[in-house]
Amino acid sequence: MKVLGWIVGIVVGLFVLMLVIGANTSPEKARAYGAQKNVDDVCDKMMSDAALGAERRMTRQMCDKMKEDATKRVRESK
């Protein structure tokens, strides 16, 4: 029973730690992380839809630029 208590205690402790970290994130940084996730999702879809050759290279270049801009926004947010 002590082992079960320790396991439950550790899980609850980790959950509380995640809540504290999430509460300390500013709304601006949360928006930047959301935008970064959206860019990743859109780029995954665009890359799967792109044809081989020049279209795929152009799509990859656009995605790399968009991801770079999103990462820059996350770094610059407070």
Image (tube, grey):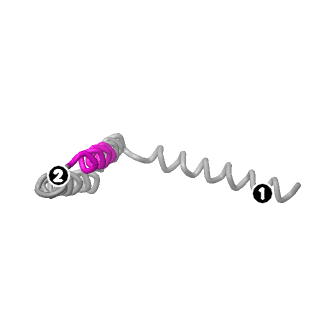
Vertical side of 10 occupied by 16: above or below: above
Disc 2 secondary structure class: helix
The residue shown at (57%, 52%) is 17
Q: Residue at the spot x=86%, y=57% of the render?
A: 2
Mark nearer the N terminus (2 vs 1): 1
Check if residue 43 falls in the magenta segment. yes
Give the alpha-carbon distance from disc 2 to disc 1, as whole Å. Answer: 50 Å
Residue drawn at x 29%, y 44% is: 45
Residue 72 image offset from top left, x and y in percent: 22, 56
Q: Which residue is mark 1?
A: 6
Q: Nearer the viewer, residue 23 or 71?
A: 71
The one nearer the camera, 37 or 5, is 37
Q: Which residue is mark 2?
A: 59
Task: Tell which of 12 and 58 is nearer to you.
Answer: 58
The amino acid marked with disc number 2 is Thr
Q: Quadrant of residue 6?
A: bottom right
- Specify the farthest residue to the front: 52
Q: Position of residue 66 (x, y in %)?
A: 19, 51
Q: Is residue 35 left or right of residue 13?
A: left
Q: Secondary structure at mark 1?
A: helix
Residue 57 in the image: x percent, y percent?
15, 58
Q: Which residues are magenta?
A: 35-50
Badge 2, how many Cα within 10 Å: few under 14, some, many 20+? some
Q: Does the magenta run of residues contain 45? A: yes
